[in-house]
Each structure stands twice: as C-alpha cells, then as structure tokens.
Image: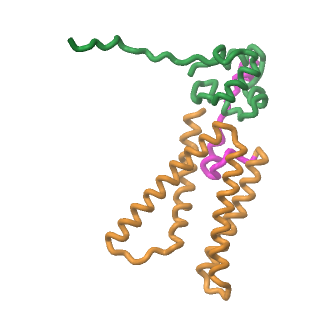
Chain colours: A green, B orange
Amino acid sequence: MKNRIRVLRAERGWSQAELAGRLGVSRQTVNAIENGRYDSSLPLAFGLSDQFGVPIEGIFEPVKHRRGPPRRGRP
Amino acid sequence: MTSSTDRLDDAAEWPYATLFFFGSFGTHTPAGRRLRRESGLSLAVVVAGIILVNAQLPVPVLIGAIGLALGVAGMGWSYSRYLGSLDELGRLMQLKAFSFSYGAVMTLAAALTGAWRVVGGGTIDPLAFLVVLVLAEPLRGVALVVLARRYR
C-alpha cells in the first residue's frame, strides 16, 4: 500500500523517532510502514490519521494492480 | 554533516545481532531487560533440573522433573509477557519466527522419531525433547533476521 507518511512527516518537521514516540510504536515500525514494507493495522492507521490531522484516505492509497485486457468469452 | 533531511529520514535498522543471538529486540526497553532476566533464571532452573534428573544424587528425581517443568513454563511465561509489550510489527515478527522455527523442528523431530521406530531403534530418552529447544532457538534467530531484512 502506498502512503504519504514521509511527506506529511517532513511537512511537520518530525523525525521517524518522534512520530514513533507519538504513536507508541518502534522507529523500525514507522520506517517499515513508510517504505511500504508493512501495512499497518486499522488502529495504527487511525493513530496516524489523528497525529497528522488527515483522514486515512489522505494518508494511504491502494496500489492499483495493472490488469490485462478483459478475457473474451468463447463464442 | 547532517542535514535536516537526513535527520527526518533517519535510517531505522533492526538490531540484527541481538535478534540472532538472543531472539529479542534488545535490552533498551524495560520489557527487554525483564525478558533477559527472567529467561536467564528459567534456563538456570532447566539446567539444574536436568542435572538433578540425571545425576546420581540422594535427591528424588521428582524434584528435578518439577524443576525442569517449572523452568520451561517460566520461559514460556516470560516470552508471552514480552510479546504483550511489543508493538504490532514486533509481535508479528516474533510470532512468525516462533511458528516457523518450532514448527519446522517439531516436524523434524516427529519424522526422526518415526524413522527411529521403523529401523527398530531402542526406547527414546524422555529428555530428548529438549533437543527441540536446542535446535529451534538458533533457527528462530535466523528467522528473525530474515524477517527484519524483509521489514526494514
């Protein structure tokens, strides 16, 4: 899942450690979420939303998988 | 020189050596220090139990057996308390590593036990189950390092 955490954090001048402290998680967890290596739980997503003052959909966006052309049905 | 961008984008590396050797995220938290203290004490009780069970001492074997059981239970109890203190990613990594390592070693132990019976081996020493701990713990360390590299 893509996210805007790095941008939102930079806008506020927060380090990963500072954001982690506010959320009550480890710095490595913030790093993994930020790099898209780990998708946070819903409670943590709400925590991020609360800290940044941005709705969840303003932080995360789903990765759209590229799909091939629709299959044609057999005649 | 550290720019403001570096300060904000600080790399957050996992403590690989601690994960491999001790199976925890380190002793920089009170929970980490408690785990180290309690699991060390439990391990000492397990070793004392093994010695009491095997040594020709005028102490009832039952005392050693109870010590052994209490030591293993103490390890499980301190580990479960430690899990409760971790955040969601830390807990996920610990549970994944635990299920992989102990699952793999118990499967191996079951296969070897079956093979032992097929080839007509003698009875199995009841203390052989401790081999599970000896093999599973290093494997758990390896699994934690692999997971830490995945989630960096």
Residue A27, image quadrant: top right
Instruction: Give left or right: position of B113 versus B139.
Output: left
Res B46 seen here: yes
Name the residue at the bottom extreme.
B58
Tell me the quarter of the picture where residue B111 sits: bottom left
Magenta range is B1-27
Horizontal side of B143 relative to B32 (left or right) equals left
Magenta residue check for A69: no
Q: Quadrant of the C terminus of chain A?
A: top left
| Nearer to us in this view, A22 or B9 | A22
Q: In the image, what residue occupies the spot 72% across and 15% down?
A: A54
Near-viewer residue (A75 or A43): A75
Q: For residue B22: magenta? A: yes
Q: What is the quadrant of the N terminus of chain A in the image?
A: top right
- Residue at 64% in and 15% down: A57
Q: Is residue A19 above or below residue B59?
A: above
Residue B86 lies, in percent from the top left, at 70, 42
Q: Residue at x 63, y 29 (%)?
A: A40
In this view, which residue lies farthest toward the left? A75
Report the label total. 0
Residue B112 falls in image quadrant: bottom left
Q: Position of residue B126 (x, y in %)?
A: 51, 73
Residue farthest to the front? A75
Q: Is residue B1 visible?
A: no
